[in-house]
Amino acid sequence: MVDQNDSFIREVNEELRSDQVRNAWKRYSRIIIGVAVLIVVGTAGHRLWDHWNSTQASGAGDQFLAALKLADEGKRDEAEAALQALEKDGYGAYGVLARFRGASVLAEKGDPAGAIAAFKTIADDNDVPEAVRNAARVRAAWLMVDTGTYEQVSAEVEAMATPSNAMRHAAREALGLAAYKAGDMVRAREWFEQITEDAETPRNTSARAQMMLDNIKASGKAP
């Protein structure tokens, strides 16, 4: 009799649970289905975005490499056109890279003034990452060593020639060369000494600076 009672109670409990499930489903089915749909759609959307993002980046990368190949082959007009197209429509960082390489192509074509202007435009663009802007300033300054004055070079990079700046080595070298070209051996020596005394200066840069210091010393123009 006890077993029969227990069996009866279990059956009643199971029936009650079934009724509760049915009632809950009737009340919340739309919400449950809606949440499930959102999860499925969200997952699918994320995968589609990843695929699109990867495809776009890959395509822009291929375009950039093709433009670099044209430049390396000496086809500078074609390279310039390819880079301008990528600058306009390039995906992600490739537009900025195209601008930077396009400025270099101008220099290679024998248009230093155009290259300097292009690099300065990049350097003054607040939408461009700071590291790229600083690199553009250094490139402009190096071109100005041959075509401009010490003051012009200084205006671009002297603010970067500080102990904590990652671009200080290139900035100091540009400043030293500009001063040397201007005949200001005292100032040139100061910049080259900062290069050789900095323990973090790359070996090749330090060697070039030491060579310039030897030349300045031999000239007898810097006490």
Image (cartoon, rainbow, N blue to C red):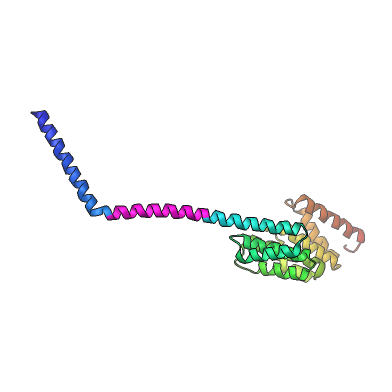
Query: Is residue 41 within the magenta segment?
Result: yes
* Residue 110 left/right relative to 42: right
Which residue is found at the position 13% from the left and 32% from the top? Answer: 6
Q: Is residue 36 above or below residue 10?
A: below
Q: Position of residue 193 (x, y in %)?
A: 80, 57
Which residue is found at the position 67% from the left and 70% from the top? Answer: 121
Q: Is residue 36 above or below residue 182?
A: above
**Residue 163 appears anywhere in the view:** no
Which residue is found at the position 74% from the left and 68% from the top? Answer: 115
- Range of magenta residues: 30-51
Q: Is residue 47 above or below residue 159?
A: above
Query: Is residue 39 within the magenta segment?
Result: yes
- Residue 63 sits in which quadrant? bottom right
Q: Nearer the viewer, residue 184 or 204?
A: 204
* Residue 10 left/right relative to 90: left
Q: Nearer the viewer, residue 162 or 146?
A: 146
Q: Position of residue 202 (x, y in %)?
A: 75, 51
Q: Quadrant of the N terminus?
A: top left
**Residue 48 appears anywhere in the view:** yes
Q: Quadrant of the C terminus?
A: bottom right
- Residue 170 sits in which quadrant? bottom right
Q: Nearer the viewer, residue 146 or 81?
A: 81
Q: Position of residue 222 (x, y in %)?
A: 87, 63
Q: Position of residue 18 (x, y in %)?
A: 19, 43
The secondary structure that dominates the magenta segment is helix
